[in-house]
Image: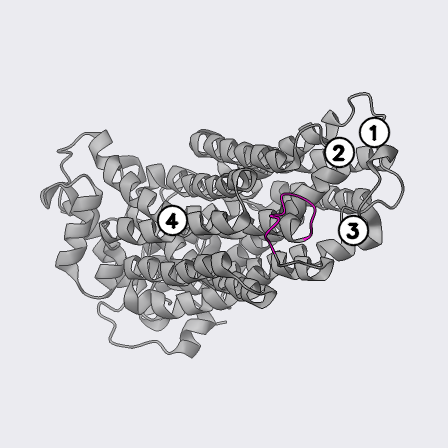
Amino acid sequence: MGKTTYALSSFKASETPSNMEPNKPEEKQEVSNFRRILPQVLASTAKNFLLLDLGMSISIPTIVIPALRGLKNRDPNEFLEFTDVQASWFASIAYICQPIGSVLSGIVLEPLGRKKSMILVNIPHIIAWLMLYFAGSVTELFIAAILLGLGVGFMEAPIITYVGEITEPSIRGIMTAAAGIAATLGFSTVFFLGTQTTWRVASLICCMVPISTAIAIFFVPETPYWLLSKNRDKDALKSLQWLRGWVSEEAVAKEFSEMKRYSENANKCTPCQKNQVATCTHKESFREKAKEMLRKRTLKPFFLVLAFFGFCQISGMHGMRPYLVQIFETFDFPIDSNWGTVVVGIMAFLANVVCTICVKFVGKRRLSLISMAFTCLSCLALSFYAYKILPPGWSSFDKHDKGAIHDLNGLNYIPMILFFTLSFATSVGIMPVPWMLVSEIFPYKTRGMASGLVAALNYIMSFITTKTYLNLERTMSLWGTIFFYGICGVFGFIFIFMLVPETERRTLEDIEVHFSDNNRKMTDRKIKKNTSFDDILNAQSGKKGKPEANGCDNKAFETP
């Protein structure tokens, strides 16, 4: 778990560390940039089928709940029903199971590898989709939701590490952002199926996705870094040749040499790293690996990402997603509520496309600020509308007399537009960016453990946000709940502005050097370019160099 490794670095001339050893093999560019990038795109696309399934798993309650509560599109032959409390549990129970899946993922990820793990994760989802289709009781529905939750949690770690380890720094941000496109496409697909067929048939159609995913992933290579960690150098070299455009060994000689150097160095135990021992023969215990989690270079990015996820959870859209149909009905949308969810999914999909295109040029930090600003403004405007137009105390969980709000003279277009804006604003930045950070912000030695733990905690927050939505509406009414989300968004904007650094166009070594400097304050958001992991070691051992200029100090490897 502690050996999760760095994304491949192309090390352009401007990115090569100043202390690189001389006489490194020269890397020849024997293929076009298009051919070099194409296999990375193909491998990432195969992985993205998992995220398509993830999006479907998260959004399926949105079409099941209104049907079983008798609010919308109930099949006359359907014999199952939900109470309000059962609906809130069905919407949230998958999230509380996802941390268990994350832990299981961390256990099998290192021995099995990223590729086999991504194939294995499809099994519980195939079973879950079939159980939903054939469900004969509410209990079976909950078991299927639990399996979906376990599968989603299980897939996070291999997904996060795979894309980081196969892509070059120049396209890592784009490839990570593209994952959000696949997830939101899953949302849109389920929402569309909800307008065309029953939730049971929709579940059967969704079952085709994990089957196709397992087949697609079979044809992509394992990551070179995992193969190097298992001393399979020849296989790692072949994998790198495939990922860089099916090229010769000479074309990737420089990158492969740099990968081996860094992999060998970072897999050493902490004392051997500190003393720069050439060969480490020690095997770190679980206790020693756990200690790495308590070092500042892990705790600082851990706090940043976890807080970012927290503000994303309470920004509005996440808590409301399972109940969108009934919320739209309460606002008396001028279009059918099920089609309203389809538009919400389309807006989220388009937002992720915009994020993928713009992240390289705009940067993750600026994109997050813009996203959070429009998210909280949309929530505040929605709450003001609900406060002024809807009768006092209205909740989306109650059945209302629509005659009380029908005389609106077209004003019901306002909440519809605001909800679509909220969906776009949320998905363009604050939803995809934290996952991008997870794949790059943690140090080498703790990336597997830290990313799995932060994903698990994020799912716990997801469970709390979704499960408590019913309680929030019962306590504060619909307008008060949305107003609460808007105020949380204001604090989220302040958090991003004050603390979140820009990681775009920075190598993974640059990022680790930044967080390994214990003299840096949390408000120091500037990550310097062209730094090297070796600078930390040189600073620790007292060798010549300019560690201060590279943001390193002698405390980087001290035992806490």
Among numbered discs 3 and 1, the one appearing first in the sequence: 1
How dense is the environment of label 2, judged by Cα within 10 Å: few (below 14), some, or many (20 and up)?
some
Q: Is residue 245 left or right of residue 213?
A: left
Q: Is residue 263 left or right of residue 251?
A: right
Q: Mark number for residue 209? A: 4
**Which element type, helix, strand or loop, lies under badge 1?**
loop
Indicate which label's residue lies in the foreground, 1 or 4.
1
The range drawn in magenta is 69-78
Determine the image quadrant of residue 167: top left
Judged from this view, the residue extending furthest toward the right is 392
**Which element type, helix, strand or loop, lies under badge 2?**
loop
Q: Mark number for residue 535? A: none
Among numbered discs 4 and 3, the one appearing first in the sequence: 4
Q: Nearer the viewer, residue 150 or 36?
A: 150
Magenta span contains residue 71: yes
**Residue drawn at x 40%, y 65% as measured from the top left:** 105
Question: Which residue type does callout 3 highlight?
Answer: Glu
Q: Which residue is mark 2?
A: 332
Q: Position of residue 545 (x, y in %)?
A: 33, 51
Among numbered discs 1 and 2, the one appearing first in the sequence: 2
**Residue drawn at x 72%, y 45% as measured from the top left:** 485
Q: Mark number for residue 473? A: 3
How dense is the environment of label 1, judged by Cα within 10 Å: few (below 14), some, or many (20 and up)?
few
Q: Position of residue 475 (x, y in %)?
A: 83, 54
Question: Which residue type does callout 1 highlight?
Answer: His
How dense is the environment of label 3, judged by Cα within 10 Å: few (below 14), some, or many (20 and up)?
some
Mark 4 and mark 3 residues within 8 Å of each other at the beta carbon: no
